């Protein structure tokens, strides 16, 4: 029996099937650190990388990191709440990402003081051509009035306090996950993120559900989910697990209530 993995988020089911079982290494640490889970971009410890070496190394991992990030965003685009899209910019030429994250943290605290702690967010940095940092962010569960009155009150802009704030009420479409992932992938290979997080998020974000099952369990899960033909179906060879297959299914609206 091979190794099978299911990843479910929003109305999407992804399955990975392999010919062989996942090898178990003695003494291997289970799970991943919170630092890595937050998308930290690290160097090699005692052997600092040049910008060219860093970018080359990160490109090797950028695709996997982008998939993990996209699923995280997509898990929160479930149609129940439409997020606000914010772009936070600097009037001055702030080029320090460390300073930028500090200012972003202060902005989040100010929002919590103003609107409470129930909202969710995820934010990614980007460097403008002039070198200045700015942030692209999605916020869920902020009051509608925060958006509706911003043009008159400039409340959000005042809480940010460092420059222009662009706000847009979205329709919650899954395309937003690709939009934000584009910036995350771009920043992931930027040497200016060395030893910095590639994104930040609130702890209350919904996360994809990941489970390992046998062949019977996989078939039963898909049957119960009521999915049809996969929208994506790719096969490939792996070094350790033999032949692999990746499928992506869209859950029909009348089937999602059964899960």
Image (cartoon, rainbow, N blue to C red):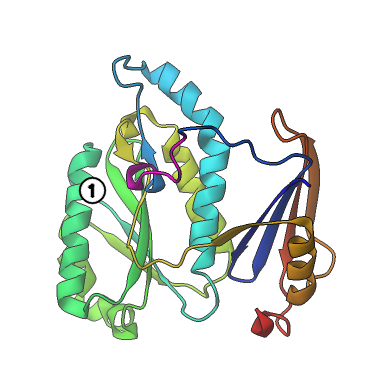
Q: Is residue 205 magenta?
A: no
Q: Residue furthest front?
A: 26
Q: At 64% from the left edge and 71% from the top edge, which residue is drawn?
A: 11
Tell which of 39 and 105 is nearer to you: 39
Apparent side of residue 149 relative to residue 245 in the rendered image (left or right): left
Residue 65 x/y as whole percent: 51, 42
Residue 145 x/y as whole percent: 29, 85
Q: Main secondary structure of the magenta part?
A: loop
Apparent side of residue 216 relative to residue 202 in the rendered image (left or right): right
Above or below: residue 74 compared with residue 100: below
Residue 235 x/y as whole percent: 81, 42
Apparent side of residue 169 relative to residue 74 in the rendered image (left or right): left
Apparent side of residue 102 relative to residue 129 in the rendered image (left or right): left
Q: How many marks?
A: 1
Q: At 21% from the left edge and 37% from the top edge, which residue is drawn?
A: 96
Please state, as top left, top right, bottom left or bottom right, where the C terminus lies in the image: bottom right
Can see residue 176?
A: yes
Tell which of 236 and 33 is nearer to you: 33
Tell which of 147 and 17 is nearer to you: 17
Q: Which residues are magenta?
A: 28-36
Residue 247 x/y as whole percent: 75, 54
Choose top left, top right, bottom left or bottom right for residue 256: bottom right
Q: Residue furthest right?
A: 229
**Secondary structure state at the residue bearing disc 1:** helix
Above or below: residue 212 compared with residue 193: below
Can see residue 94?
A: no
Which residue position holds label 1?
101
Choose top left, top right, bottom left or bottom right for residue 71: bottom right
Q: At 49% from the left edge and 51% from the top edge, which residue is drawn?
A: 69
Above or below: residue 206 compared with residue 256: above
Q: At 52% from the left edge and 36% from the top edge, which residue is drawn?
A: 62
């Amino acid at each position: 029996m091979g190794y099978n993995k299911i990843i479910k988020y929003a109305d999407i089911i992804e399955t990975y099937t392999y010919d062989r079982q996942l090898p178990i290494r003695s003494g291997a640490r289970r799970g991943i650190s919170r630092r890595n889970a937050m998308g930290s971009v690290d160097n090699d410890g005692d052997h600092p990388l040049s910008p060219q070496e860093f970018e080359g190394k990160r490109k090797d991992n950028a695709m996997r990191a982008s998939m993990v990030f996209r699923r995280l965003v997509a898990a929160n685009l479930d149609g129940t709440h439409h997020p606000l899209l914010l772009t936070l910019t600097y009037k001055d030429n702030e080029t320090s990402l460390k300073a930028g994250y500090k200012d972003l943290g202060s902005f989040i605290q100010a929002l919590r003081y103003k609107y409470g702690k129930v909202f969710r967010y995820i934010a990614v940095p980007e460097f403008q051509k002039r070198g200045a940092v700015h942030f692209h962010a999605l916020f869920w569960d902020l009051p509608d009035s925060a958006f509706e009155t911003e043009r008159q009150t400039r409340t959000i802009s005042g809480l940010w306090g460092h420059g222009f704030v662009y706000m847009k009420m979205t329709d919650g479409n899954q395309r937003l996950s690709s939009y934000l992932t584009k910036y995350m992938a771009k920043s992931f290979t930027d040497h200016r993120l060395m030893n910095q997080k590639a994104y930040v998020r609130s702890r209350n974000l919904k996360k994809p559900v990941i489970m390992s099952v046998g062949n019977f369990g996989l078939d039963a899960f898909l049957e119960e989910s009521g999915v049809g033909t996969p929208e994506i179906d790719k096969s490939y060879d792996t070094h350790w697990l033999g032949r692999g297959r990746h499928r992506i299914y869209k859950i029909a609206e009348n089937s999602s209530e059964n899960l």
